[in-house]
Image (cartoon, grey):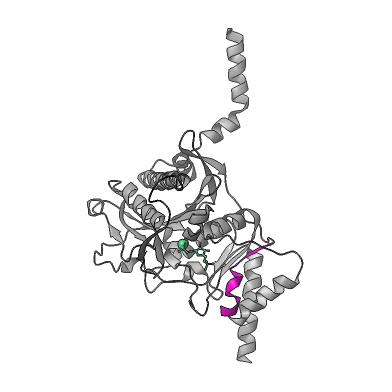
Amino acid sequence: MTQTSVEQISADLLDQGYYLDRDCTTLSRHVFQQLESFSPEAQDISALMNRIGLAGKLIARRLSRSGLVDDALGFTGTVNVQGEAVKKMDLYSNAVFISVFKQSGLVCRLASEEMEKPYYIPENCPIGRYTLLYDPLDGSSNLDINSNVGSIFAIRQQEGIDEDGAALDLLQDGHKQLAAGYILYGPSTMLVYSIGKGVHSFTLDPTIGEFILADEHIKTPVHGPVYSVNEGNFWQWEESIRDYTRYVHRHEGYTARYSGALVGDIHRILYQGGVFLYPGTVKNPEGKLRLLYESAPMAFLIEQAGGRATTGIQEIMDVIPEKIHQRTPLVIGSKEDVALVESFIRDRERREQD
Ligand code: AHM
Ligand code: MG
C-alpha cells in the first residue's frame, strides 16, 4: 500500500468520524460524558451502569439459548412473595444481578420483586453507597413463546443499614431515584437509561460485547396513537377506565398494542408515543405492577423523556410506599394521552359526587 492511499484511507475514516464516535460510545463512557466529570460520584455511576450492562449481557446470553440448554425454560414449582409462580429464568436473572454486584464495593443491598426481603452484601456495606431495586425478568410469561421480556432497574442512595429486611429507608418517593432504566431482550438487546439528564438508548453489539449508543435525548411524542392495556380485564375495571376504553374504540386515530411485557410496551411508547395502562382490577385493586421495581423506575424514565406517569389520581413519582412490594395502578406515556385517561377518571369522580 502506498503512503498516499494510507493517508486517503485515514482521511476517509476521519470523514466518517461520527460513526466511529458512535461506535466507541459505550455505556460507561456515556455516563462520564453526561456527568461531564471523572469525579468519584461519576466513577460510581459509570461502574454501576457497567455492572447493570453486564447483568443484561448474561441474561441475554442465556435467553438466546433458552430452547437449547436444560433448565432454562419452565417453572421452578415455587411461588414468590407476590404469590406468582416463579420461572427458572426469573430465579436465574435475579441471581445474576446479585452476582455481578458482589465484590463491586458499590452496592450494599439489592431489593427485587422476586425476593421477600432485600439481599445484603455485607462485605460491600461499609463502603457500598447504593441500593439497587430491580425486576430481574419482567413479562416472564412471554418466555415460553420466545417473545420479548425485560429487566427494570433503579438506583437509590443507601440510607442506613437495616438487616432485619424491613428496609424502611426505601419507603420514599420516586424522586429519590438517582438513575433508572430497563434492558429489553428483543430481536436485539437494548439498554435504556437515565441519570436525570435525559433518556438514552444503547444496543448490544454481540460481536464486541458492548452496549453501543443508539439514540440520545429521546423525547416521547406529546401524543401517539397507541393505547396499551389488557382489555381482558375490562369486566374488572372501574367505570372510568371502561369510559376511556369506549372512547378510543369509538374515535379514529387509536390503535391497540399489548405485548404482555411492560418493558416492550413502554419502549414502543417511548419512541412512538401513546399510553400504557395497568389500572386496578377486582382481583388486584392496586393493579398488578410494583411501585419500587416497575412503576417508579419507568415514571422516572418517561418523565425524563417529556412524558408523564400517574396512578390516575397521583403522580407516580410522588407516591410514598407503605411496604416495599407495594403495587400501584399505572397510567404512563405521552402527556396528552395520560391527560385524556385522567379526564375520564375526574369526570366519573365528579358524577359520583353529584
Ligand atoms: P411480572 O413482573 O411478574 O412479569 O409482571 C409484570 C407484567 C408486565 O410486564 C405486563 O405489563 C403485565 O405484567 C402483564 O400482566 P397481564 O398478563 O395481567 O396483562
Ligand atoms: Mg415485572
The location of residue 132, given as percent across then percent down, is 37, 56
Residue at 59% across, 61% down: 307
The location of residue 71, given as percent across then percent down, is 38, 51
The location of residue 77, given as percent across then percent down, is 36, 63
State left or right for residue 308 relative to residue 90. Answer: right
Observer-nearest of 237 and 109: 237
The quadrant of the rendering that contains the C terminus is: bottom right
User: Extreme right residue here?
Assistant: 252
Magenta stretch: includes residue 261? no
Image vertical order of residue 31 relative to residue 163, above or below: above
State left or right for residue 76 relative to residue 180. Answer: left
User: Extreme top residue here?
Assistant: 2
Image vertical order of residue 354 relative to residue 338, above or below: below
Residue 237 visible to an observer of this rendering: no
The location of residue 258, given as percent across then percent down, is 60, 62
State left or right for residue 125 relative to residue 28. Answer: left
Q: Which residues are magenta?
A: 225-236
Query: Where, by quadrant of the figure, is residue 156 drawn?
Result: bottom left
The quadrant of the rendering that contains the N terminus is: top right
State left or right for residue 177 relative to residue 11. Answer: left
Q: How many marks?
A: 0
Observer-nearest of 299 and 183: 183
Residue at 75% across, 72% down: 250
Residue 130 visible to an observer of this rendering: yes
